[in-house]
Image (cartoon, rainbow, N blue to C red):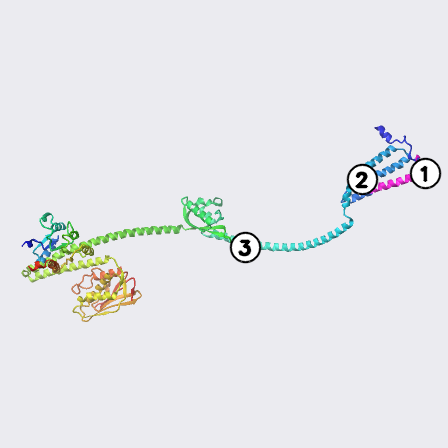
């Protein structure tokens, strides 16, 4: 190897190339100078290319310029070798340089060939100018568009700012309204809550937590069940689920446990908040404490049932008393009258059988005994009548008062026989009552009027009806003996009499009976009188009168 | 006279005083000839239906009129009335209820059972006597005018 290198730089074996030129100076220098100029040119070209490549780093296919530079540099070197060989026959070295040049030039040529289609496709400067113009126009257009876009952007930003301000203000209002709502729901005495459409409760007011003594965590969703009475809870849950499913308002009374463990009753109502399509958005519910109301209701019910029980008891007692009274009346009717009949009957028998044997005084006593017995008989009869009519059932019907009073006047004709009585009789309205009982009223009042006018030469009895605030008021007026109004309170009492028996006979039952009958008709009876100037008896009948 | 054995008036009365007064009233009206007195309802029924002490009597020999007190020991007046009016043999006998009672239910029931008259005993003896004489006379006259002519 060192041997080969030695030979390569050795020029001893070959004669210099100048010998071929015969050392003719003209031809030697022509070759030497031409080769020198060529080499100079060849060496300058790669430098220019290198400078170009360095400056135009953006350019495509830079590697081909490198290839050219190497190739031309190699070519330049061959020409320098030509000059060297004129004086030195160093042909191995110059051949090697040529071989290197060939090695550099052949790949360059191949690569250039392969590059050609791409080089052909490269736009021409004209086309580039055209596209440049188009590009410029487009750039202008884009700039214009950009300008209007900027304008629009500014507008948009302004509007966004406006809208933001609006939103802020509406947010402010919303916060205020929300705060109002919170204050309100915490201020009301009710417990309040809100639920999702599916019934899940997500909010309670403070009152709820204050009353139940629970926390929001405990209460969330279906946690409210823990403050319910387990006995009522299933019903509550079912009703709430039904409402949630149907979207219908919920309303129910149930107890809720307070923080101290006691239960109070609440009226609970929940309303669905719906959107335009009718879908439930949420539920708003309240629980109103109705404990006191319920206690009052319970108390009323208790009192009522107590009252009812007592009414039933009292009614039973009264019925029993009535029965006893009936039995008593029956007994009185039979048993009290019997001895009286004996007293009267045997007194009469004595008078009949032994009258002549008795002194006048004895006969008088017997007559007095009989009078006493008969008076007592009358008292018993009147008392029984009073008792019977007081108990008799009331058969109300329309009563033709005119006819009734005429009938009574006929019945009492015996009482008027031999007397001058001016009976003034105005037209009377019909009324609603028991005809038999009302007849008894008219009999008693009219017979009283006839009786107490007994001492009048010209008796006047007036029958009529006046209209007052109370409605129609019937009256019987006489110009008889009257009575002292100081004793008016005794007038309607049983066995109460305002006159001595030797003046006007009677048992003191008649007016008591009148009052009893009128009261049973829901009416009122009263009298006005003056001693020796006569009396007026008034009465009303409930249920109205008709003319 | 065989007819004289036939009782004209059956007087059913438990109260001895009322009985005596009634008898006196009938006597005064000359109606006391053939009176039979029963002191309670059971005795009255025995007589009417010829049982016990009256087994020898014939049911067909009916009294001309029965004066019946309402309130009687053992069997009461209404029951006696019901039995008399419930038997075809005795249904035709006029029965006059004589009682102290003015109770409406008694009156209504007596008429429902077919009583012929109803008089309330007044306290006043004259009125009582008059009533007894009037009904006694009326029914005797109505049933057996020839008897009274004899």
Residue A429 percent across, percent down from the top left:
27, 66
Say left or right for A154 vs B135: right
Q: Nearer the viewer, residue A343 or A498?
A: A343
Q: To which chain does the residue with label 1 belong?
A: A
Q: Which residues are magenta?
A: A19-47
Say which mark, if any, is on residue A109: 2
Q: To which chain does the residue with label 3 belong?
A: A
Taking the magenta stretch, the answer to whether it contains residue A312 is: no
Q: Earlier in the sequence, mark 1 or mark 3?
A: 1
Marks 1, 3: nearer the viewer: 1
Say left or right for A75 vs A487: right
Q: Which residue is mark 1?
A: A25
Q: Quadrant of residue A159?
A: bottom right
Q: Which residue is mark 3?
A: A173
Cα separation, mark 1 vs mark 3, equals: 112 Å
Q: Classify mark 2: helix, strand or loop.
A: helix
């Amino acid at each position: 190897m060192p041997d080969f290198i030695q030979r390569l730089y050795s020029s001893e074996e070959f004669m210099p190339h100048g010998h071929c030129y015969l050392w003719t100076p003209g031809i030697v220098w022509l070759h030497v100078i031409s080769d020198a100029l060529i080499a100079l040119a060849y060496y300058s070209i790669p430098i220019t290319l290198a400078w170009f490549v360095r400056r135009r780093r953006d350019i495509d296919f830079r590697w081909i310029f490198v290839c050219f530079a190497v190739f031309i540099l190699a070519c330049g070197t061959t020409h320098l070798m030509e000059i060297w060989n004129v004086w030195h026959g160093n042909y191995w070295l110059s051949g090697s340089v040529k071989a290197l040049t060939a090695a550099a030039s052949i790949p360059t040529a191949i690569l250039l060939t392969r590059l050609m289609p791409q080089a052909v496709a490269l736009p021409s400067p004209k086309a580039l100018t055209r596209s440049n113009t188009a590009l410029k126009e487009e750039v202008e257009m884009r700039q214009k568009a950009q300008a209007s876009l900027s304008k629009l952007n500014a507008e948009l930003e302004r509007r966004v700012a406006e809208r933001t301000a609006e939103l802020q203000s509406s947010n402010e209002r919303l916060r205020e309204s929300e705060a109002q709502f919170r204050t309100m729901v915490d201020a009301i005495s009710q417990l309040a809550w809100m639920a999702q459409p599916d019934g899940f409760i997500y909010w309670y007011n403070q009152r709820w937590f204050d009353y139940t003594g629970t926390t929001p965590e405990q209460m969330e969703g279906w946690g409210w069940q823990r403050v319910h009475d387990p006995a009522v809870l299933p019903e509550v849950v079912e009703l709430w689920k039904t409402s949630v499913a149907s979207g219908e308002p919920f309303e129910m009374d149930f107890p809720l446990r307070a923080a101290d463990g006691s239960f109070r009753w609440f009226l609970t109502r929940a309303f669905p908040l719906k959107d335009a399509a009718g879908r439930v958005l949420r539920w708003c519910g309240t629980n109103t404490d109705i404990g006191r109301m319920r206690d009052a209701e319970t108390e009323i019910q208790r009192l009522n049932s107590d009252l009812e029980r007592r009414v039933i008891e009292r009614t039973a007692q009264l019925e029993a008393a009535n029965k006893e009274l009936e039995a008593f009346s029956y007994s009185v009717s039979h048993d009290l009258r019997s001895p009286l009949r004996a007293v009267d009957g045997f007194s009469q028998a004595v008078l009949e059988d032994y009258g002549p044997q008795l002194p006048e005084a004895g006969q008088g006593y017997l007559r007095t005994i009989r009078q006493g017995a008969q008076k007592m008989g009358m008292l018993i009869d009147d008392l029984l009548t009073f008792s019977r009519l007081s108990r008799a059932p009331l058969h109300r019907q329309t009563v033709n008062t005119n006819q009734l009073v005429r009938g009574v006047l006929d019945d009492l004709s015996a009482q008027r026989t031999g007397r001058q009585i001016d009976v003034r009789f105005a037209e009377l309205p019909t009324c609603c009552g028991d005809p038999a009982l009302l007849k008894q009223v008219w009999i008693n009042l009219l017979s009283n009027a006839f009786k107490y006018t007994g001492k009048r030469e010209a008796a006047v009895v007036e029958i009529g009806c006046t209209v007052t605030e109370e409605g129609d008021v019937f009256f019987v007026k006489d110009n008889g003996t009257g009575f002292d109004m100081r004793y008016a309170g005794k007038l309607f009492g049983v066995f109460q009499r305002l006159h001595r028996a030797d003046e006007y006979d009677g048992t003191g039952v008649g007016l008591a009976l009148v009052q009893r009958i009128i009261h049973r008709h829901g009416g009122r009876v009263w009298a006005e009188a003056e001693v020796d100037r006569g009396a007026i008896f008034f009465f009303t009948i409930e249920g109205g009168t008709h003319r | 006279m065989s007819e004289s054995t036939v009782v004209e008036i059956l007087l059913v009365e438990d109260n001895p005083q009322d009985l005596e007064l009634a008898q006196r009233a009938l006597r005064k009206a000359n109606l006391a000839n053939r009176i039979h007195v029963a002191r309670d309802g059971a005795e009255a029924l025995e007589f009417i239906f010829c049982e016990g002490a009256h087994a020898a009597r014939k049911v067909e020999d009916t009294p001309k009129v029965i004066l019946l007190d309402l309130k009687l020991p053992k069997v009461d007046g209404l029951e006696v009335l019901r039995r008399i009016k419930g038997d075809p043999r005795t249904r035709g006998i006029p029965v006059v209820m004589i009682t102290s009672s003015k109770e409406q239910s008694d009156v209504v029931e007596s008429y429902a059972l077919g009583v012929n008259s109803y008089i309330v005993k007044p306290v006043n003896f004259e009125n009582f006597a008059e009533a007894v004489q009037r009904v006694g006379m009326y029914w005797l006259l109505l049933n057996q005018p020839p008897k009274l002519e004899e």
